[in-house]
Image (cartoon, grey):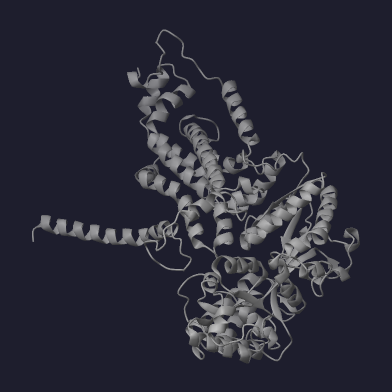
């Protein structure tokens, strides 16, 4: 067999194996979606609903007082995720630029401190974070839900590494044209770090969308619940009665992050691999 | 010179570039932060309580939560002093994480619901309660309930309700199997006979909930056993524990009245779909059972648990105790209002609450038995069983310890593993995990 034929055969085998894994990974998602339209209460593992109905999805809007309207939780999650993402892009890119290109005393120490702080698990700072927001009067507000995601240490480091790898000539040229730091950041750096910003945006969006623990601790009214919290109440309210409703709520919750990841996964991989350890 | 596409736009080289000053950036940031901080959900109508909002946080994540909300709404409309905001954000470990975080920060909910075994580790965050301040005495509560929140002679909460187990059974399946639906089993032998008759006619005789120790625990107590001793040594492998484990194992592997593996995930769904004749059930399921009867024409009913062995009459139960945590700010006012609310709940809310749980208030029992609401009326059975109720204990790292028991029972019941060996191993591991550091 020629080398070309070998390569073709290997590619076909790899594609077949990937297809098998894709089907295995996708089956639970397909089953979730199918079960969300299942009207029969007889437990089963069918891929196609035996008694198709939209009633489960209607129950999401009016759960009869047993859980929060899932679309309210969807709205809350959307607000938090979008605001977190937009502000995180602004804050982290500015911080990354300052660390990469603005000389100031203690630059290296600040970077080292950021890296060291990334090792601290989030659970360790839950109590002081709660205290801080309590003193600021921000508990049970969108501010409490969004602010912890806006300052992303990983995001600052990611952007900083990306900017460090930019050709210094561009920035030098802008400086000699009379551009100040803000103009260099706004007109030179930002257009060049779009891949890193895309990656950061996706990571912050997914992180804030999927966050369960902090919204659980910082909210105290059902109408401020985010989707992960609402899913828990749906599971408790309907898990032993009607799992079709539970599947409908799960299908709604996983759709936005799944779509974000499906369309943007190459940016995530490219962005993380581009940070490297250079500079 | 910069390439054209990288030059600042609309900035001819003869004009000085427009700059964003530091002051305007700071103003923009401060304005955004202020706007964000002030925003609450447009759907939230309870955050503007004028600062007089009492948070009432519970673990009622099921249909009992909807019922408690209606009771709280009634309290809010009966007075103007405070607004009570009821939430049921989570259950189990997540719920305790929320409570503990807020308590450590000095800003816990004004009133929170706890199980009896959760009070000992959290008592340093809780106010002690004097029944006289609430206008109660110990005699106002069903025997054995008010003591659930007592530690070293101090009262840390008020027992609102308990959740004793009962036998859920299907009257129609009983009739089909030739059994008298008005005479559900009252002994272990009658239970096995009924399960065998049911299995012969089609459905399973009995199904237990997987991953729990609830059927075993009742059996163990009824055989004269216990869970742990005073020194936190696990007693799973004592003779009563082995007798209880063997009974559970026999239901699957000797009498074949219980499946060795569940085909579907949900015990409740199997019972409602008439795939099984008997289950262990609890008060919070009662409304759903009666709703299923009304909607699907089934005849699901409840009865006292049989007395399986010759030991003391015992029924496993949960407990719902309302506690008042300590606050760093406004503590005195919050404590006073919380006491008023709890007192009102017990006096005025117990009858309604019988739609979901077995109230501990003795005064409500008569009204419950006379109620026009069939769920409330049926709850009288659970209230009666409450006097035999026994509760899971508190022990250091009990959450870890009982997992060993659950795993052992799953192996015994579903895999047919040796009862004594499994329980001895589980007891050894549990005892080790409950050993407190010196």
Image label count: 0
Residue reaching furthest to the left: A1
Q: Nearer the viewer, residue B19 or B268?
A: B268
Residue B107 visible, this angle: yes
- Residue B8 drawn above or below residue A240: above
Q: Is residue B9 left or right of residue B267?
A: left
Q: Nearer the viewer, residue B181 or B109?
A: B181
Q: Looking at the picture, how far across and down is residue A77, in whole percent?
A: 53, 44
| Residue at screen point 19% across, 59% down | A10
Residue reaching furthest to the top: B14
Q: Nearer the viewer, residue B243 or B172?
A: B172
Residue B109 visible, this angle: no
Check the picture and name the quadrant holding the N terminus of chain A: bottom left
Q: Looking at the picture, how far across and down is residue B420, in whole percent?
A: 57, 89
Q: Looking at the picture, how far across and down is residue B77, in whole percent?
A: 78, 47
Q: Is residue B351 left or right of residue A14?
A: right
Check the picture and name the quadrant holding the C terminus of chain A: top left
Q: Quadrant of residue A133?
A: top right
| Residue at screen point 54% across, 72% down | B267
| Residue at screen point 47% across, 78% down | B261
| Residue at screen point 41% across, 41% down | A199
Q: Looking at the picture, how far across and down is residue B336, in whole percent?
A: 85, 52
Q: Is residue A127 left or right of residue B1?
A: right
- Residue B226 drawn above or below residue B269: below
């Amino acid at each position: 067999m020629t080398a070309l034929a070998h390569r073709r055969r290997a590619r076909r085998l790899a594609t077949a194996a990937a297809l098998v894994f894709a089907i295995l990974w996708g089956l639970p998602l397909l089953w979730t979606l199918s079960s969300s339209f299942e009207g029969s209460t007889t437990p089963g593992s069918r891929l196609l609903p035996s008694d198709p109905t939209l009633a489960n999805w209607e129950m999401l809007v009016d759960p009869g007082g047993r859980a929060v309207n899932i679309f309210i939780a969807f709205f809350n999650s959307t607000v938090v995720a979008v605001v977190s993402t937009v502000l995180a892009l602004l804050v982290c890119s500015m911080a990354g630029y300052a660390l990469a290109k603005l000389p100031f005393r203690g630059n290296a120490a600040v970077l080292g401190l950021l890296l060291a702080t990334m090792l601290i698990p989030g659970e360790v700072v839950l109590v002081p974070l709660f205290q801080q927001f309590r003193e600021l009067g921000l508990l049970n507000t969108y501010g409490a839900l969004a602010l912890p995601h806006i300052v992303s240490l990983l995001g600052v480091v990611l952007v900083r590494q990306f900017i460090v790898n930019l050709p210094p000539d561009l920035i030098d040229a802008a400086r000699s044209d009379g551009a100040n730091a803000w103009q260099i950041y706004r007109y030179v750096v930002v257009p060049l770090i779009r891949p890193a910003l895309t990656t950061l945006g996706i990571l912050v969006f997914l992180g804030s969308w999927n966050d369960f623990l902090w919204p659980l601790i910082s909210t105290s009214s059902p109408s401020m619940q985010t989707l992960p919290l609402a899913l828990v109440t749906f599971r408790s309210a309907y898990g032993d009665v009607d799992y079709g409703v539970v599947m409908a709520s799960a299908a709604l919750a996983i759709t936005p992050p799944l779509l974000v990841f499906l369309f943007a996964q190459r940016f995530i991989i490219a962005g993380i691999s581009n940070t490297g350890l250079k500079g | 010179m910069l390439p054209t596409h990288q030059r600042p736009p609309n900035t001819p080289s003869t004009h000085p570039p427009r700059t964003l000053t530091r002051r305007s950036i700071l103003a923009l940031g401060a304005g955004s932060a202020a706007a964000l901080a002030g925003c609450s959900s447009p759907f939230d109508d309870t955050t503007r309580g004028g600062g007089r909002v009492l948070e009432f946080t519970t673990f009622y994540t099921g249909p009992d939560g909807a019922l408690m909300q209606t009771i709280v709404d009634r309290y809010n409309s009966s007075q103007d002093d405070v607004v009570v905001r009821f939430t049921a954000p989570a259950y189990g470990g997540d719920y305790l994480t929320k409570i503990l975080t807020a308590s450590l920060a000095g800003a816990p909910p004004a009133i929170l619901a706890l199980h009896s075994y959760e009070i000992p580790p959290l008592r340093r965050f809780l106010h002690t309660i004097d029944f006289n301040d609430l206008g109660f005495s110990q005699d106002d509560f069903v025997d054995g309930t008010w003591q659930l929140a007592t530690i070293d002679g101090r009262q840390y909460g008020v027992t609102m309700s308990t959740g004793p187990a009962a036998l859920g059974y299907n009257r129609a399946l009983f009739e089909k199997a030739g059994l008298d639906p008005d005479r559900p089993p009252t002994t272990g032998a009658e239970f096995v006979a009924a399960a065998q008759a049911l299995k012969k006619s089609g459905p399973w005789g009995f199904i237990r909930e997987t991953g729990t120790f609830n059927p075993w625990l009742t059996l163990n107590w009824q055989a004269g056993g216990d869970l742990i001793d005073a020194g936190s040594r696990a007693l799973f492998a004592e003779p009563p524990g082995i007798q209880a484990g063997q009974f559970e194992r026999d239901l699957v592997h000797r009498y074949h009245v219980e499946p060795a593996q569940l085909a579907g995930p949900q015990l409740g769904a199997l019972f409602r779909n008439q795939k099984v004749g008997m289950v262990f059930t609890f008060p919070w399921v009662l409304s759903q059972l009666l709703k299923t009867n009304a909607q699907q024409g089934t005849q699901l009913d409840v009865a006292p648990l049989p007395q399986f062995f010759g030991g003391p009459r015992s029924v496993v139960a949960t407990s719902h105790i309302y506690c008042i945590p300590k606050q760093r700010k406004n503590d005195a006012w919050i404590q006073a209002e919380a006491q008023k609310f709890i007192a009102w709940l017990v006096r005025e809310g117990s009858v309604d609450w019988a739609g979901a749980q077995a109230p501990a208030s003795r005064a409500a029992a008569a009204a419950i038995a006379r109620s026009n609401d069939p769920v409330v009326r049926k709850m009288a059975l659970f209230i009666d069983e409450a006097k035999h109720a026994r509760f899971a204990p508190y022990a250091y790292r009990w959450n870890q310890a009982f997992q060993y028991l659950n795993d052992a029972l799953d192996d015994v019941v579903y895999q047919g593993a040796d009862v004594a060996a499994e329980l001895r191993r589980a007891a050894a591991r549990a005892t080790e995990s409950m050993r407190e550091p010196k």
